[in-house]
Image: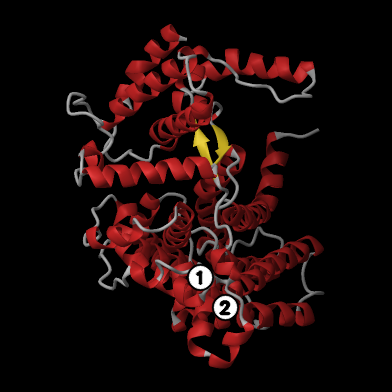
Amino acid sequence: MLTTESLQKLWNNWEIRVLVLISLTLQLSLFHFGRQRRYNVKTWIHIFLWLCYLVADSVATVALGVISSKQGNSGNDSKVHNELMAFWAPFMLLHLGGQDTITAYAIQDNELWLRHLFGLIVQSSVAFYIFITSLKVSLKDHWLSLLTIPMLVAGFIKYAERIFAMRLANDTTEGTTFISTKKYANATFDGFDVYDNFVINFPKFRPLFQNQKMTHYTSEFKTIKTLDFRKVFKMIEIYLGLAYDDFYTKAPLFSKAWVCIFRGITFSSTVLVCVFFVINERHKHLQTDLIITYILLGGALVIEIYAVILLIASDMAHRWLYRNVKFLRSKMSSDQFFAQKWSNTMGQFNTLSFGSKNPGIVLQGTPKIFADLRVWFFIHILPKLKTELEMLFYKTNKQVSDELKRLVWDTILEKADLHGPGFSEDYNRYLTLDKSVNVDIDESIIIWHLATEICFYTDNDINVGLDHKRHVIKEISHYMMYLLCVLSCFQWEVQRSPFRNHVATFKLIS
């Protein structure tokens, strides 16, 4: 029969083992789903990735603390066991260094780079303390302790890389280089030189993603106006891809020579430690601990190999090779630069469905029991959740059609020609279509969303040829509400109070 004492003893024996395995699992999840995040818009993936991102650092930090507290404890299995636990400590530093595919979940996370710098100092000191302590209890045979040294170096480098990537992403300095869009106004978007211009120009567009105003864009817009809408949206797609890499991953580091050198150090250190551990240490420890160590080494090796592959296959690496290795130019393809870099979908949020607790359309072929369960979940469970969580379940996605892209681009050109308030430099009023509608941007979105819904469902006297535009405008309206209510893209300017005040109205209208 299990007692409190036996459970406590069981937990004491397995605490470190469980923590290091959970930490590795979280890192593998971040590595895999962090890459999928760019293309996959499924809600559960984003929620799972967010949870992993929140928990990963805490688990690795706790594991380091537990290892340090148990060093030199004679009550453990053996002194050799203490030495093996000390060997696990650098892996926690590796995990704190994060993955190449995700360094931040939101742009605001990059502002915490100083906190992570302090964490690097503290956690590296803890790992070094564990290493020194393990030496004291293993003076006769310290081969494993010697293997700990290169892993400590690799862990420190990985953690420092993450902090430097966050520091670069948090840089608000506007770029000074700007290549005229005339260089690619007539391009077919299939050459290295065209992509090179995009990369060089990107620093001028970074302020848009940091809630700052752009400068020197008026003359460039005159050239962009001559482009086909497909080229314009391909330009936007490429810039958004560069922005994603710049703010959320370690990709900006790949263009720096010293990073490639350090990558070589971390990769070679991991490989050498794996080889020497298998040769020298496989018969000296408990089988359970050996299995866990092999899992940690295997996980670190897989991540390092995949990271090297990503580095070699990255746009930055191809760009560098094309610019510096002339004999490879004729053998290289530029297709990857202009391949689809996003899901080509946009989020949708219908306030009327949310207000009426309408679960929406059930997919054809869904068994009745699951359809009824879905309706019950939306009516009885979701209303009890926090409003922000509840809204996630009403969010859907739509493919972005060429018709929508054409309509958006034509509208922008029309506003530019009119020089009206719709094309004003005053970002707070750029949605105001008439001076009589003197409201904030969030209220303006809500008002026009409701107007769009009412017109869509009540105006039946519509020309058949214009019916497709009605659906496109409705999709844009739902997308704006998605930005406002679900994604909170305007969070720095918009408080949620106007939306909350209108929820009761939505319910009455519904």
Residue 450 is at least partly visible in this image: yes
Callout 1 touching callout 2 (CB < 8 Å): yes
Quadrant of the frame with the N terminus? top right
SS for tag 1? helix
Residue at screen point 57% across, 78% down? 266
Where on the picture, by quarter, is residue 200?
bottom left
Going by the image, does 450 lie left or right of 188? Answer: left
10 Å neighbourhood of mark 2: few (<14), some, or many (≥20)? Answer: many
Residue at screen point 28% across, 49% down? 211
Residue at screen point 79% across, 24% down? 365
Numbered circle sitting on residue 266: 2
Numbered circle sitting on residue 158: 1
Residue at screen point 54% across, 70% down? 190
Numbered circle sitting on residue 239: none
SS for tag 2? helix
Mark sitting earlier along the chain (1/2)? 1
Q: Could you say where residue 217 lies in the image, as x and y percent from the top left?
A: 25, 59
Q: Nearer the viewer, residue 7 or 30?
A: 30
Q: Could you say where residue 366 lies in the image, as x and y percent from the top left?
A: 77, 23
Q: Nearer the viewer, residue 369 or 452?
A: 452
What is the distance, in whole Å, between disc 1 and disc 2 at their CAs?
8 Å
